[in-house]
Amino acid sequence: MAKTRGNLTPANIKSTTGDISVDCMFNPEWYTVTKTNEYDQGAQLVKPPKPEFKRFGRSTLTLSQLIFDTYETGDDLTSITNKLWDFMRPVDSNDPKSSPPEVKFKWSSFEFTAVITNMTVKYTLFDKDGKPVRAEVSMTFIQSEDPTRYPHQNPTSGGGPIQELHRVVSGDRLDLIATEAYGDATKWRHIAEYNKIRNPRDLRPGQLITIPPL
């Protein structure tokens, strides 16, 4: 099974037909699900009537700052971002009425079947030749299933202990991170080994580090 850079089970976005699939290199720090139902509030009287239900709204999923990074591996970042853009392109390029694919976002027990309405890819790091090697991606999905259904989440699915993520900022050091996480600076090696960090001085701002349980 694929793993994130922090050795976690990755969130995945794929078309429901299965022909396009992208694993997250770094799982999102958070996601939001929003749902709005429509009501008729009636005339603005001194004592307005009780709002009358009109229709169910579809849930919206927002993912922010999905990070894709090929700086260390030297892989082609555009091969990943092009797959993401394929989620926004028509299924049949020869048919002008063809719609983009339906997709499913899945992370552990959470599943959201939807279409993507908005995506922004922000390239933030480049190699000496100008080739992008890091990108931050934001995506908005709108539910394509029955709008009366809440996005699927199975609370009984096992996942082991919850693992904390730390986003590196300028000036961060592993001993400082270990002190904050465990109250013991000498535990920095535990973090380094888990994240396969060979040089503890080579931390990059924006990098996500998994804080494993002791």
Image (spheres, rainbow, N blue to C red):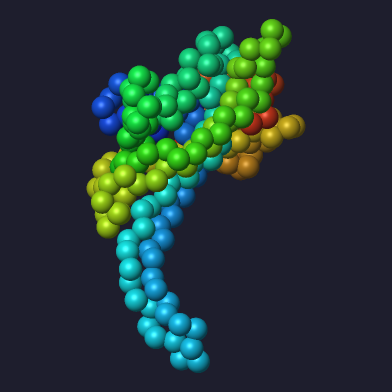
Q: Residue at x 73, y 32 (%)?
A: 170
Q: Is residue 107 above or below residue 60?
A: above
Q: Is residue 14 above or below residue 159?
A: above
* Closer to us: 140 or 54: 54
Residue 150 at least partly seen: yes
Q: Residue at x 40, y 57 (%)?
A: 35
Q: Position of residue 15 (x, y in %)?
A: 32, 29
Q: Is residue 65 above or below residue 76?
A: below
* Closer to us: 151 or 169: 151
* Closer to us: 47 or 181: 47
The residue most toward the bottom is 46
Q: Is residue 162 left or right of residue 181?
A: left
Q: How many marks?
A: 0
Q: Is residue 22 above or below residue 47?
A: above
Q: Is residue 102 left or right of residue 24?
A: left
Q: Residue at x 39, y 73 (%)?
A: 40
The residue most toward the front is 96
| Occupied quadrant, residue 106 | top left
Q: Position of residue 25 (x, y in %)?
A: 48, 25
Q: Position of residue 41 (x, y in %)?
A: 42, 77
| Occupied quadrant, residue 163 | top left
Q: Position of residue 135 (x, y in %)?
A: 59, 26
Residue 203 at least partly seen: no
Q: Residue at x 63, y 25 (%)?
A: 123
